[in-house]
Amino acid sequence: MQSRGLYGKKYINIEERTVDIEAPDEDHVIVKVKACGVCGTDINFVRDWEQDYMPLGHEISGEVIETGKNVSGIKPGDSVIVEDCTMCGVCTDCKSGHPEFCRNMYDMESQPGMGEYLSVRYNCLNRYEGLDHISACLTEPLAVSLTAVENAKIPLGGSVVVLGPGPLGLMAAKVAGLRGAGFVAITGLPADNPRERARLELARQFGCDMVIEAIGNSIEENIKQVFPKGVDRVIVSSPPESIYDAFKIIRFGGIITYFGLHFGGKNVIDLDVNDMIFRKISLIPTFAEPAINFPVSNRLLREGLVDAKNLITHTFTFENAKATFESVINGSEPVIKAVMLPK
């Protein structure tokens, strides 16, 4: 079987390749990709990554079409989410109740989720029902946002600021409310293009108590008017330099969790360790690999607690992939979440 897929690197250099997909071995499953979301990591690759082409796409929903002889619990015709990294289940950390520290993960074996077919190990799959494929591909990014919210340990009725109104930030803000936050604010770039206006408007629809356009010291000024001593928690979904703003608005003893990445040289920042120690601030990274929280993430989508229909604003195919990536990056279209449909 042959499968077309997308690979990319800097300058929105996107290449379509055709590869052979072997018949499944004993423990593998062939999945026909139905939908694959564009992640911030994909954007980083096609905007900043200067090395070899990277396979694009890991937010995948699909349909099982063939299984290996040792596979049970999954059959052809099942709708599945593909985990891009899966814990092994047998290492010391997995056996000690900490699969999040597994270093023996199964992965997608360098295959692009933005493709027609995948061959993956059976335990990389999550079956689902009652949800369309396009909405279901949000399971992976929502699980990242959910993990960030859990890492933040939000106190009941607590105050939370999410830095960055991309899809992950928007979902983090929504889940923070579901987890019992009493005040949720979100910040974004000035609403001077269709992309930023759409994202900030959805933040309001998601129930954010405050939406801040980051101009000068506007984040600190707006937050300190409501919380003079700072907020309980900050979740950083925007690039690493945004952590500077997080330190300006976090209260004594607060927690900052962050998952915003940068592959273009802006991943290193300066931190005042004395300030962190004296103010007892916890800085907690969120890296949701191996896959964690997929079942509850899928349930939140299925039950409409997180609204996939409003998040997913654009779909595209092989033919218009480059144009879609360009519009996400330059803000020329009101893109909140773009999803590839391989057919």
Image (cartoon, rainbow, N blue to C red):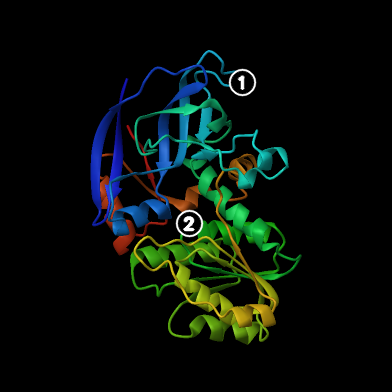
Q: State the residue lying farthest toward the top.
A: 69
Q: Nearer the viewer, residue 317 or 6?
A: 6
Q: Quadrant of residue 89?
A: top right
**Residue that badge 1 annotates:** 73
Point out the tag, 2 or 1, that comes first from the N-terminus.
1
Residue 163: image location, x then y, percent? 52, 69
**Amino acid tagged 2:** Pro
Q: Residues within 10 Å of mark 1 (few under 14, many from 20)?
A: few
Quadrant of the snapshot with the C terminus:
top left
Q: Nearer the viewer, residue 274 or 211?
A: 274
**Residue that badge 2 annotates:** 167
Q: Nearer the viewer, residue 135 or 221?
A: 221
Task: Please state if 49 lies on the left or on the right of 35 as rendered.
Answer: left
Q: Quadrant of residue 263?
A: bottom left
Mark 2 and mark 1: Cα distance apart in space? 32 Å
Q: Is residue 332 visible?
A: no
Image vertical order of residue 135 relative to residue 208, above or below: above
**Amino acid tagged 1:** Gly
Q: Residue at x 29, y 43 (%)?
A: 7
Residue 31: image location, x then y, percent? 44, 26
